[in-house]
Image (spheres, rainbow, N blue to C red):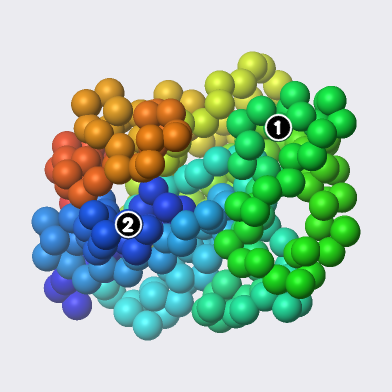
């Protein structure tokens, strides 16, 4: 095929159905428009990084099998590391590649550490994409507290970087072009042997933006775009409209694809 496939995945920051203002108008769709390509955007609001990379892995292998010669460009937007996922038997299977996984974060409360250490509840109603009887059990509440107590940004970052090393190796194997970047900029961490080892591997790849210094949200904020949220979230993690997404595609993604000789 002469037309490239522009594949996207992420959370609400790249979900084309999250808000009417970005309905089929995220950076993924704009890159597809600029390159005259087909678009397959599999971003889902509330997603965790493991879900983003797992489903992307499935999709790029499947697309390559269906279209052995087509140019495929994957635009992967990463999200908050507090999020994980669970296997939930009574979850609604929305697509085969999603299976019974449900993205889950132990709380959306910004003062969760203070609450936890003071013996107060960190439960909320925004911890999963789906709400099922299994996730309303007493075990779900215990799980939230346990995950919060043992949460380590170092552990999450090490696993994310390891996943990126493996994901990009598969992209190379199947001749998939890609750019990978944060939606919200990742937390800056100190030195740690395993972290530094995998970070060095990822940092050597110019197709992966620095996770701690660059993100779609902070780029939009620094360029004076206005979030379309309800105003309760800080601007650096706010959601931005189609004007910011179009500019991000024009000023960041297309030039980076050219710079890395993927166009």
Instruction: List x then y, in percent, for residue 106.
Output: 71, 46
Check disc 2 and report the residue beneath it: 19
Residue 207 badge: none
Picture quadrant of residue 92: bottom right
Q: Earlier in the sequence, mark 1 or mark 2?
A: 2
**Could you tell me if the residues under marks 1 and 2 are in contact, i.e. CB atoms within 8 Å?**
no
Residue 26 lies, with reference to residue 68, above or below; the image says above
Is 35 rendered above or below residue 243? below
Label 2 SS: loop
- Residue at 67% from the left image edge and 75% from the top image edge: 91
Q: Which residue bears the numbered disc 1?
A: 112
Which of these two is toward me, 216 or 17?
17
* Residue drawn where x is 19% and y is 77% of the image: 1
Q: Is residue 39 left or right of residue 119?
A: left
Q: Is residue 161 left or right of residue 79?
A: right
Q: In which image quadrant can residue 28 be found?
A: bottom left
Judge whether residue 50 can be spotted in this image: no
Q: How far from the left and from the top, in percent, is residue 210?
A: 43, 30
Q: Position of 93 compared to 63: left or right? A: right
* Residue in view at x 78 percent, y 47 percent: 144
Q: What is the secondary structure assignment of the residue under circle 1?
A: helix
The residue nearer to you, when weighing 58 against 83, is 83
Real-space Cα separation, disc 1 to disc 2, in angstroms: 27 Å
Q: Nearer the viewer, residue 66 or 251?
A: 251
Depth check: give the residue in front, 74 or 150. Answer: 150
Within 10 Å of disc 2 (Cα), the crowding (few <14, some 14-19, many 20+) is some
């Amino acid at each position: 095929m002469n037309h490239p496939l522009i594949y996207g995945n992420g959370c609400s920051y790249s979900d084309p159905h999250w808000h009417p203002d970005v309905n089929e108008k995220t950076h993924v769709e704009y890159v597809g428009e600029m390159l005259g390509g087909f678009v397959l955007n599999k971003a889902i609001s509330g997603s965790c990084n493991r879900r983003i990379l797992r489903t992307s892995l499935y999709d790029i292998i499947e697309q390559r099998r269906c279209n052995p010669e087509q140019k495929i460009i994957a635009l992967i937007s990463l999200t908050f590391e507090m999020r994980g996922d669970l296997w939930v038997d009574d979850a609604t299977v929305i697509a085969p590649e999603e299976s019974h996984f449900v993205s889950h974060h132990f709380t959306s409360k910004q003062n969760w550490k203070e609450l936890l250490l003071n013996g107060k509840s960190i439960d909320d109603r925004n911890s999963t994409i789906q709400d099922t009887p299994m996730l309303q059990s007493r075990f779900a509440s215990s799980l939230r507290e346990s995950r919060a107590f043992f949460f380590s940004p170092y552990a999450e970052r090490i696993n994310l970087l390891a996943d990126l090393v493996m994901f990009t190796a598969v992209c190379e194997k199947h001749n998939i072009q890609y750019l990978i970047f944060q939606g919200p900029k990742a937390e800056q961490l100190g030195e740690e042997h395993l972290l530094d080892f995998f970070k060095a591997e990822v940092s050597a790849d110019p197709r992966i933006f620095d996770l701690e210094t660059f993100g779609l949200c902070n780029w939009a904020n620094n360029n004076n775009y206005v979030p379309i949220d309800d105003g309760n979230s800080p601007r650096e993690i706010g959601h931005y409209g189609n004007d910011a997404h179009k500019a991000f595609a024009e000023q960041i993604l297309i030039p980076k694809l050219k710079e890395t000789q993927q166009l």
